Image (cartoon, rainbow, N blue to C red):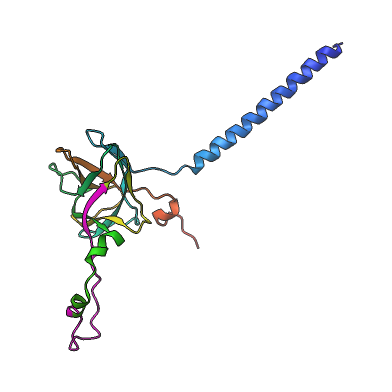
Amino acid sequence: MRSLGTRRVALAAGVATAAVIALSGCSAGQVAETALLKTPISGLNTQSPDGRLEIRNLQVVYDDAEGFPANGNAQLELALFNQTQAPITVLISSRPQQTETAGIVSARQIGLTGPAATASAAPSASASASVAPSASASPSAPAEPAAPSVQPARITIPALGSATFLPEDDQKVLAVGLSDRLAPGNSLSLVFEVSGTTQPLELVAPFAIPLSPASRGPVESGEDHE
């Protein structure tokens, strides 16, 4: 027959064990839920050889499974961080790689477009009048889509500052005039030149991974449904 003290010790040990199991279950559930909330980061993270510039999440913005056609334009996503105590200027361009590699595309120009890029390019009243169509022009002639107004991707970053370009931002970084089709699985050849540095940084920007299966396009099934 157990004494009263023995029964109390056993009861206390049982309660402690149950509490540990309950806490373990809660913790496991929280960790699993947190893991599900994490989104994939497919962008490239790197820095200049001297460490003055950090580049984060560099990638081609996902459009659809077809990607971007040859001679078309593709948007880039990236963040630039100045690690110095003085302003630096970063010039982004593109050129074919010295050794031709399948799936790596170049662009005719890397440019900035948006409010800051087009403000100085707005036509004056007289310029608008000079390009207006004449009365003899056919009113039924379809208008050709205007090419995006871009200027060279020359970005000045203040001391210890940053410059971020996201898909939803008004100002965008565009790869204009792609040398070939740029689709998921392919990459874009880029060159970063930092002021005060003689060695350019040659990079390959991957194509972004869509955040949800639905955005990857319809899933084909081999089953026939009647």
Dividing the picture into quadrants, the one containing residue 42 is top left
For the N terminus, which image quadrant? top right
Residue drawn at 62 percent across, 34 percent down: 26
Q: Is residue 16 left or right of residue 184?
A: right
Name the one closer to the observer, 51 or 29: 51
Query: Is residue 12 at least partly visible in the picture?
Result: yes
- Residue 181 in the image: x percent, y percent? 23, 55
- Examine the rendering and report whether any part of residue 67 can be seen: no
Left or right, 221 with respect to 91, comes to right
Which residue range is magenta in the image? 130-156
Taking the magenta stretch, the answer to whether it contains residue 60 is no
- Estimate the x, y position of residue 190 in percent, counting from the top left: 21, 46
User: Looking at the rendering, which quadrant does residue 100 occupy?
Assistant: top left
Q: Is residue 29 left or right of residue 93?
A: right
Image position, residue 80 (x, y; %): 30, 44
Q: Residue furthest left?
A: 98
Compared with 42, 172 (above or below) is: below
Main SS, magenta region, reads loop
Q: Nearer the viewer, residue 169 or 16?
A: 169
Spot occupied by residue 10 in the image (x, y as percentages of width and height): 77, 17
Residue lying at 17% horizontally and 88% vertically, measured from the top left: 136
Q: Quadrant of residue 45?
A: top left
| Magenta-colored stretch includes residue 149 | yes
Q: Residue at x 21, y 48 (%)?
A: 92
